[in-house]
Image (tube, grey):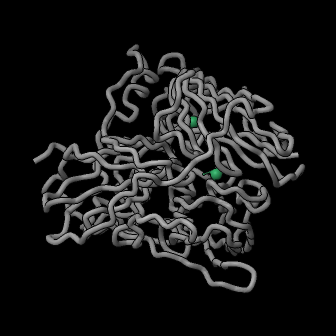
Amino acid sequence: MDPYFFAAEQTLNELQIPPQDLGTLDQSARAFQLSLQQGIKSFHAGLETETLGINGAYLGPTLRFNRGERVSLAVSNRIREASSLHWHGFHLPATEDGGPHQVIENGDTWNANFEVVQFAGTFWYHSHMEESSGEQVYRGLAGLIIIEDDDENLELPNTYGVDDIPLIVQDRRFNEDGSFSYMDTYDDLVIGVQGTDVLVNGTINPMFAPSTRLVRFRILNAANARTFDFALSNGQAFQQIASDGGLLEAPITQTSLQLAPAERAEILVEFNGQEPFNLISRGRTPSFPFFPGAMSELMRSLNSQELQILNLRPSSTLEASPTVPPQLASIYQLPAAAAENTRQFQLSMGAGMRSGNDAGPGTGARSGLGGGHGRGNYFINGRRMDMEYINERIPLNTTEIWELSNNSPMMHPFHIHNGQFQLLDRNGNPPPANERGWKDTVKVGSGERVRIIMRFTDFVNEENPYMYHCHILEHEDRGMMGQFVVV
Ligand code: C2O
Ligand code: CU
Ligand code: CU
């Protein structure tokens, strides 16, 4: 028996599959009705948790769009506090983006309407409320979007819930009474809120029984702050076929795959016998230097834990599956020479993010909020997010290189609204094969310099900005975000 196997006394729960929502076709668009609501869900048997959800108690339906069509989404807010709903990874006008400027007050309905110009792939939607995205997503305001493309006739597993399985992976911490524990420690403020329990599609200790030889998993890291390093407990390899923005050029054989918050990947896993195994997240060996104090301790503990994600128990008979196509897509690689402009973005963590002893006057920094002078401020280019300040103005029809660097002790996943970009290099080295497709979120490690390239070809709007930010939601909520307009 492999070391990661679920302890026998743990009860496994059948993996919940979010319902699909195909919308309804009216003359002009595929229309969706989404309601942000409060709910109660029992994650741990015998305990109830107050939650938020979209058309349900926790999380939302999987929305299905087709490339090339127009969609309209009526989002009504019934959660008794202001919110917003953002379509993550989409190329669309800023007014339809659902960012912090498209606030939906309690009781109101917001209508978004846009054309789906994306490639087929796995996207998502989530709350983007100014300063409370972290808490609202933690409580449940998130869901998956699958875009299909009629012109794409690759033979890939595509029966939702059978051989095409969404995995919305999150970590949560619960209080003894069953309620969510959120922002209760100094660690939460520094590294973001990480939990001890893994939820997949809202299921705790989940189990899935494949009935086909090949299963496509659409993995979304919907955690607030945790990076997962996915692997199979029996050491078996899998094939990654898609990244954030859609299919890769060809399947990539891997034995592990790191996804930071907001990153997605589609993988194909093969099942041959009846022997059960687990999808796990590997623990990382700490590389941060050891010195006395809370900061070193915290950074060394980051992602060092092994986690069990999903127990896989193949059925006794497995149906045949299509063979994996050797070629998936052809991706035009934007050449660095095409860029007219380069911008620099420096990610940093503010004062107060120190080790125990020098964390400032007053109460100790390890427990309780506050934690020293900085009170948890995060910056991009030395500035905190300001709703009234446009950080960058980008001339229409330009290709730009954004140089992302990080002088803080931890990794930040950098996300840009309004579409997909490509990686040019990491510290001057070509990106790994699975980062050569379309991306909207990219890991920028401590001390790293990552260059990305992006085109800005439409949606001029002087007034309404798009966001760029760290997708550790507690960092985003505390300033690590900026705004750009296309002019
Ligand atoms: Cu996932 Cu600014 O968003
Ligand atoms: Cu986004
Ligand atoms: Cu961050």
57 on left or right of 479: left
Q: Indicate the position of residue 334 as horizontal and vertical percent values.
A: 66, 39
Q: In the picture shown, does residue 316 fall above or below 358?
A: below
Spot the residue most to the left.
Answer: 1
Q: Indicate the position of residue 175 as horizontal and vertical percent values.
A: 38, 54
Q: Nearer the viewer, residue 475 or 155?
A: 155
Looking at the image, which residue is at 55% across and 71% down?
Answer: 63
403 on left or right of 371: right
Q: Nearer the viewer, residue 365 or 157?
A: 157
192 on left or right of 257: right
Total count of labels: 0
Q: In the picture shown, does residue 411 fall above or below 19?
A: above
Q: Indicate the position of residue 199 as horizontal and vertical percent values.
A: 37, 57
Q: In the picture shown, does residue 365 fall above or below 39?
A: above
Looking at the image, which residue is at 79% across and 30% down?
Answer: 341
Q: Indicate the position of residue 457 as horizontal and vertical percent values.
A: 79, 49
Looking at the image, which residue is at 20% across and 63% down?
Answer: 313
205 on left or right of 347: left
Q: In the picture shown, does residue 331 fall above or below 160?
A: above
Q: Nearer the viewer, residue 380 or 20?
A: 20
Looking at the image, which residue is at 80% across and 32% down?
Answer: 340
- Residue 190 in view (yes/no): yes
- Residue 479 in view (yes/no): no
